[in-house]
Image (tube, rainbow, N blue to C red):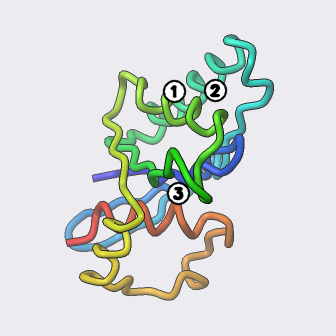
């Protein structure tokens, strides 16, 4: 199964592709590691963002998007642009989307420790949360 872990930070979706096949985890190369939504007040820009993500899902045959859930209230609440990004991803018609809470993510990683040090993956440091989100979804 090929999934894409997504962390939404500000006006960006940070991405990490991961595949689980025959008991092995694989991190396929991806042309996009972050996708920004600029000038979110214009519907055309939201459509362009959604189109770019839809095309990425098609091209890489992603079966599931896993978005790290952000609180709606409180000190660590997500911003309005982030929720627009989340909605645009949830409304993609060519793949399923799952929200994963921080609690669920920590629980899964505690139960299924990551078999490799993050630095050894070759991913950028800012992709770590997207990586953990994808791993926690696929962990068995």
- The tag on residue 49 is 2
Q: Residue at x 71, y 19 (%)?
A: 45
Disc 3 crowd, CA 10 A, few/some/many (<14, 14-19, 20+): many
Q: Residue at x 54, y 81 (%)?
A: 118
Left/right of residue 93 with respect to residue 48 in the rendered view: left
Residue on which the image places disc 1: 88
| Quarter that holds the C terminus | bottom left
Decide: marks 2, 1 in contact (CB < 8 A)? yes
In the figure, 105 relative to 69: above or below?
Answer: below
Q: What secondary structure is marked by label 1?
A: helix
- Quarter-of-image position of residue 12: top right
Distance from disc 1 to disc 3, alpha carbons, whole Å, reads: 18 Å
- The tag on residue 121 is none
Residue 123 placement (x, y as % from top left): 62, 70
Q: Earlier in the sequence, mark 3 or mark 2?
A: 3
Disc 2 crowd, CA 10 A, few/some/many (<14, 14-19, 20+): many
Residue on which the image places disc 3: 16
């Amino acid at each position: 199964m090929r999934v894409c872990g997504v962390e939404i930070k500000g006006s960006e979706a940070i991405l990490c592709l991961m595949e689980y096949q025959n008991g092995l985890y694989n991190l396929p190369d991806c042309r996009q590691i972050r996708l920004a939504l600029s000038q979110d007040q214009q519907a055309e820009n939201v459509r362009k963002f959604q189109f770019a993500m839809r095309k990425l899902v098609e091209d890489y045959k992603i079966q599931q998007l896993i978005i790290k859930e952000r609180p709606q209230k409180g000190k660590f609440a997500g911003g309005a642009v982030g929720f627009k990004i989340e909605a645009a991803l949830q409304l993609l018609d060519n793949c399923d989307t799952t929200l994963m809470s921080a609690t669920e993510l920590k629980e899964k990683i505690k139960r299924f420790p990551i078999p490799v040090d993050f630095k050894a993956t070759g991913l950028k440091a800012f992709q770590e949360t997207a990586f953990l989100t994808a791993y926690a979804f696929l962990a068995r």
